[in-house]
Image (spheres, rainbow, N blue to C red):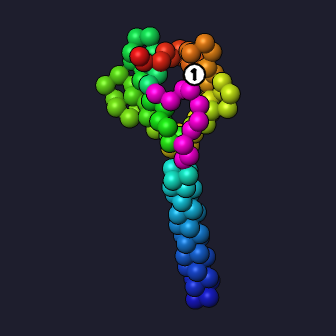
Amino acid sequence: MNIVSTSVALLLAAASAEGENRKSGNATEVNMTENAEIQNHPYVGMWVTGDGHVRQELLPNGRYDEARGNRKSAYQGRYEVKGNHIDYWDDTAFTADGEFVDDILYHGGMIFYREK
């Protein structure tokens, strides 16, 4: 009887700890979203690949919204610009970066042009 009680107690403790880890992970995502700051750089706006398939909007609050083909908001997350370098943190924990050169964005093997 003692072994069964101990096993049940261990299972309950493990389940509780797992639930707390999930909660803290979600809190991090919420904080990343809530802590987005107004960006002070010249790159805010819509950036589009030459064929128009990928459209990435850099919002002034430090968030981005990327559409792919007919899929609106395919990727969303936050970003930071330092000089001509941009870092992305997708809401699903994917990270990426890019460079702005002569008003062209090079990111993920793609070339984006500012939408005018």
Above or below — where is 1 with respect to 66?
A: below
**Residue segment shown in magenta:** 36-45
Front residue of 16 and 70: 70
* Quarter of the figure with residue 38: top right
Hey, which quadrant is residue 8 in on the image? bottom right
Residue farthest along the left direction in this orientation: 70
For residue 101, side relative to residue 54 (left or right): right
Tell me the SS state at disc 1.
strand
Left/right of residue 71 with respect to residue 27 in the rendered view? left
Is residue 42 located in the magenta-colored stretch of the structure?
yes
**Which residue is tagged 1?**
107
The chief SS type of the magenta part is loop
* Residue 103 colored in magenta in the image: no
Is residue 99 at least partly visible in the picture? yes
Image coordinates of residue 42 in percent, x first then y, are 56, 26
Q: Which residue: 56% across, 15% down?
A: 104
Q: How many labels does the image show?
A: 1
| Picture layout, residue 50 above or below residue 23 | above
Q: In this view, does 31 lie above or below 1?
A: above
Q: Would you place residue 84 above or below residue 89 in this image?
A: above
**Quadrant location of the C terminus in the rendered image:** top left
Please state which amino acid type lies under the numbered disc 1: His
Q: Where is residue 85 in the image (x, y as percent from the top left)?
A: 66, 27
Point 54% across, 60% down: residue: 27
At 57% from the left edge and 22% from the top edge, which residue is drawn? 107
Image quadrant holding the N terminus, namely bottom right
**Residue 111 x/y as whole percent:** 53, 14
Q: Which residue extends farthest right?
A: 83
Give residue 34's position: percent from left, percent from top: 51, 53
> What is the crowding at mark 1: few (fewer than 14 residues within 10 Å), some, or many (at least 20)?
some
> From this viewpoint, is residue 77 visible?
no
Residue at x 62% of width, y 24% of height: 98
